[in-house]
Amino acid sequence: MIAILIAVTGKGGTGKTLVSAMLVLHLCKKGSLLAVDADPDSNLPEAFGVEVERTLGDIREIFQSSRDEIKGDKEIWFEAKIFEVVKELDNFDLLVMGRPEGEGCYCYTNNILRAILKKFMRHYDFVVVDCEAGLEHFSRKTIAGVNYLIVVSDTSRKGLRTAERISELMEELNINARKGLIGNKVIDKRSENLIREFAENSGFKFLGSLPYDEKVVECEMMGKSVVDLMKTNCSFVREFEKIVKNLESWVVLCQS
Amino acid sequence: MAERKKVEIPENVKVKVSEGEEYDFPVDISPMHEGERIRKGEMYVELAGPKQPGFELVMALPEDQVEDMKVTIVGKDLDELEEGKAHPFAMIYYVAGEKIDTDLEPIIERRNHDFQNYIEGVMHLNQRYDVWIRVGKKAVEKGLKSLATIAKAVMLLFKNEMPFIEKIEAVYATDREFVEKTLKEVAMPIYEERDARVESLHDEDVEEFYSCTLCQSFAPSDVCIISPDRPSLCGAITWFDGRAAARVDPEGPNKAVPKGEIIDPIGGEYSGVNEFAKNESGGVTERIKLHSFLEYPHPSCGCFEVIGFYMPEVDGIGWIHRGYPEPAPNGLTFSTMAGQTGGGKQVVGFLGIGISYFRSKKFIQADGGWYRVVWMPKELKQKVLQYIPEDMRDKIATEEDAKTMEELKEFLKRVDHPVVKGVVRPVDGKKITEGWLEEKEEETEEEVEEEKVEQQPTQPMEFMQLSQLQPQSLQPVIKLTIKNATIKIDKIIVKKKE
């Protein structure tokens, strides 16, 4: 049992959290899945219409500040607390990484955390991580072994430049993952071609593009969850199904 | 000491006994299953956990009292429990063997967590009275019908992985009254006794210390030595943690360090530690005195929670913690001193420690312990106040008493701090400092100080050479302004452009 670890990233505002959430809802039909919110700025739980009271960051802080007083074995304590903050939803589990580290030395804390998460994640068929463009959890190796890194970009120059930077960062950090690109808020053929061309020239697998859709804007404005959006069967939702198919055949191709 | 004896099995409760070894298990048993989450929907029953009482306990007993591979189940067995619900649960193991004593109980007990998790479809979390177990539906469908099967599998793993266990017997219980009563009357006193032992264990009581090289990624020559009286300087790892980690992974970042011969019982110098430090640091650190400040101090990686600094002006030691942003009376902030002290080097005059070292009975005892301490921020002082000897509590200045060296001198004179007239270290009653001398004599003392400094191959010497070199051989061609920076440099090579 080795999980397929997919990280979704991109510039803020490109819709990566929406894409992550949609991906989770599709993939969890095919096997056991862990969704990880690794972006302190985004809100993956909200996309699923749930609330998460405590995050892994909270537990890490408690561990960091009270590790002196924990009785018995600290690793076992830490692991149990992490299991407690993992939220069980109907078809998948959800882990929110939460706030970043505070001051001081996290060598020991992160060392234990790494080992626990590694043991824990390998039992899922899929792990989908919504992460910020700085890839902090990967550089600290708290989340290790990402197989597919998907960048979501809109048609703006900035969005694509972020994709380029992520590509460079991966090389620097020695992240040995396959790179995919999804275009979002694409209004016409011309801008789709622009993104496709960029992908092909920069070593990304182009997985498809998603249209700018009023329904999406409406759902976000009303604070509706992605589950509700999926029910509308709007053009965005239909196009996303194509992306999932592309992703699946890409994964099959890469695994074989 | 809490008595170790078999728990009494109540007569009015259903009891099932299973004897002898079992090898045919309906589910797979392997370390691969560690970390597997049994989700609520896939769960057959939950045992103990947040909603029900429960505990796990290992007790060392004389060999003739333990009936090897026997399991007694008190209360309902797995297939009789109501599905989908949480139930009380206790796991008690009696162990015997020539090498087994009560010291080993917690080490054996810790492995219950691992071994239960090896069983496919069984999830075990947490420890002691916080245990939380789930058994999956799939495992029950495959034929895992009795708690005795789980107990037998775990006992076999215990005997395989810890061969010093010669005999092992288990009592598993789901009967609420029995679980609650045994937890209160038998288990709790034993846990409390173990915690008390943690507090009272000293360097001289053990044969081995533990190392920590977790920080070598950024302080390559750093070696942390963790002893019962000296926890790691990041504050994270105690001797007990080190021991647990070393047993699980002997080649990992926490290795056992045999003490060897004792060289200096007051300073805390051991031949085994010196030898280890020399090897692991690549020769950078040759001698370490665990409880000394001024002589062969413990090296500092950079992770310390608190820095100690020697102030020659008052012949005393100050401490500053990471959260205190202002400069200490020596004019330096935490981060400035941290920059000087870190990197795995021994820097005489500075020492990085974890807050828990203030609790140690051997706290810098070679240099007078608390009687040499003259200053610490109020926040830190409050935190450790209970460990300060009562007669010293009012004599250690905080930022409210003194912000500068002059104010500190005044304060120390006013409260008649031991450094003023000379410190007598409590550990052996020896007078270790002369106190503040009259103006005339002060000069001679300073000379002695300087000689001492020259003997130490310390960093400031290297700095001096560099600064002397610059104006002579290099014409200034650029102006470098650095603001608000923390800089750590292992080596600077200045070469003439060819």
Image (cartoon, coloured by chain):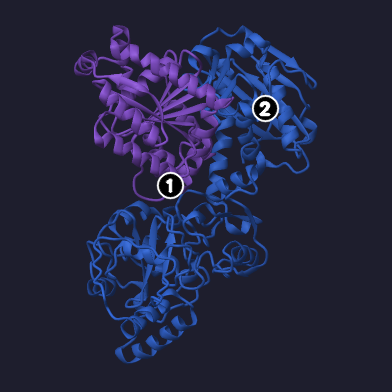
Identity of the residue furthest to the bottom in this view:
B440
Q: Quadrant of the C terminus of chain A?
A: top right
Q: Identify the secondary structure beneath mark 2.
A: loop
Q: Identify the secondary structure beneath mark 1.
A: helix
Q: Which residue has dot 2 on it?
A: B30
Number of numbered discs overlaid on the protein picture = 2
Asked if the residue under mark 1 is in contact with the one under mark 2, i.e. CB atoms within 8 Å, the reply is no
Q: Quadrant of residue B164?
A: top right
Question: Both on one chain, marks 2 and 1?
Answer: no
Badge 2: few (under 14), some or many (20 or more) residues near its Cα, within 10 Å? few
Q: Colour of chain A?
A: purple
Please indicate, yes or no, whether residue A56 appears anywhere in the rendered image.
no
Q: Chain letter for mark 1, please.
A: A
Q: For the point 57% across and 27% down, which residue is it?
A: A2
Instruction: Return the x and y of residue B335 as percentages of the image width and height.
Output: 32, 61
Instruction: Return the x and y of residue B89 as percentages of the image width and height.
Output: 57, 20
Q: Is residue B67 left or right of residue A80?
A: right
Q: Colour of chain B?
A: blue
Q: Quadrant of residue B463?
A: bottom left
Q: Amino acid at mark 1?
A: Glu
The tag on residue A92 is none
- Please identify, in this view, whether the residue under mark 2 or under mark 1 is nearer the observer: 1
The tag on residue A172 is 1
Asked if residue B340 is positioned above or below residue A192 in the image, the reply reads below
Q: Chain letter for mark 2, please.
A: B
The answer to which of A231 and B107 lies nearer the viewer is A231
